[in-house]
Amino acid sequence: MSELIKLKNIIKRFYIDTPNELEILHGIDLTVNYGEFVAIVGESGSGKSTLMNIIGLLDHPTEGEYYLEGTDMSKAKDKELSRVRNKSIGFVFQTYNLIARTNAIKNVEMPMMYAGIDQRTRTERAAKLLDLVGMADRMRHTPDELSGGQKQRVAIARAMANNPAIILADEPTGALDSKTGRVIMDLFHQLHEEQGKTIILITHSQALAEETERIYTLSDGLIVGERRGTGVRAGSQLTDFGPVTPPAAPAEAPDMQTAPALPASDALAADPAPQAKTYSDMLDLVIEMQEEEEESN
C-alpha cells in the first residue's frame, strides 16, 4: 500500500519561550496507508487531541514533518491548510458539531458551500449522502429534533460531503449508548469495506480499536506501541441501509484556490470551541443558503 499520511518526529509545544512552556508530543512517527482503517488509542491526557489536531490540519507542529498525499503540510500557511482540510479531510466528532437551527441537509451542504459548489449540485449530493446513512426521512429536521445517533449519522454524511481522502473520527461513539454506538461503528466499517475509505479512529476504547486493521497506542505524548487489529466488527447491530454506493463527488469550483479560507478554529473544521467571529461568518453562510433556497422555490 502507498502512504497517504506520514508523520516524522512530530513535536508540539505550547507557551513557547515562556516559563510555562509545555511539550505535549515528543517525537511522533506514524504512517497511514490509502484505504486503511487505523486506530489511535490512548487514555485522557495522552496527547490524542493534540495529535488529532495536527493530523486534521487544525494546528501546526512545532517541529517535524507531516506529509499528506506526498505534500509537506508542516510549513503550510493557514489558507492552504484550510483549502486542503475542506477538500481532503472529513471530520466526525463526539459532540457532532452540527449547526443549531439549521436542518440536516443544510448541515451536510456546508462544506460544499465553502468549496464553491453550486447550490443544485450540493443539495442533490447532500440528499444522497443522507440517504446513504439512513437519514433520508430526517433531512429537514434540525439537530434538536434528532437523537444522538441520528446527529452522528448526519455528521458522517457531512464528513463525506467533498469526498475526502480521509475520515477522521474523534471518539465518535463517546456520547452514545452502546447499541447506537454499535450502529455508528458498523457504518464506518461499511464505508471502509464497500467504499474503500481511509478512516482514522481516535479513541480511548481498546475494544473499538481492536476492530480496526492497525492500532497505534499513544501514552504521554509518545507512540508506545503499534500492532495489528482484528479488522472485525463486534456484534453488528447495523440497520440495513443497502449497499454503500456513494453519489458522484462534486466537481471542484473553477478556482478552488480562492475558496473561502477556514481558520483552524472554524466549526466546519470541527473545532469543538469555534470563535465568535467564525461562528458569525458561519451564520452568514447559513442565511445565504436559506436565501438561495427561497429564490429557487
Image (tube, rainbow, N blue to C red):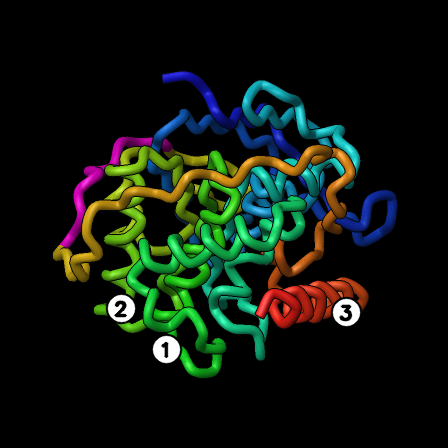
Looking at the rendered structure, the secondary structure element under dot 3 is: helix
- Check disc 2 and give the amino acid type: Thr
- Of 97 and 141, which appears nearest the observer? 141
Residue at image mark 1: 147
Relative side of 263 to 238, left or right: right
Q: CA separation, marks 1 and 3?
A: 26 Å
In the image: residue 79, left or right of residue 140: right
Q: Give the range drawn in magenta.
A: 226-234
Q: Which amino acid does label 1 sit on?
A: Ser
- Give the residue at mark 3: 280
Residue 193: x, y in percent? 24, 37
Whichever of callouts 1 and 3 sits on the residue coming sooner in the sequence is 1
Q: Which mark is residue 180?
A: 2
Q: What residue type is labelled 3?
A: Ser
Badge 1: how crowded within 10 Å, few (<14), some, or many (20+)?
few
Q: Which of marks 2 and 1 is in front?
A: 1
Q: Which residue is drawn at 46% across and 26% down?
A: 31
Q: Quick one: SS at disc 2? A: helix
Q: Which of marks 2 and 3 is nearer the N terminus?
A: 2
Residue at horizontal 35 percent and vertical 43 percent from the top: 246
Image quadrant for the C terminus? bottom right
In the rendering, at what x and y percent does residue 282 appear?
71, 64
User: Disc 2, disc 1: CB below 8 Å?
Assistant: yes
Which image quadrant for residue 251? top right
Mark nearer the viewer, 2 or 3: 3
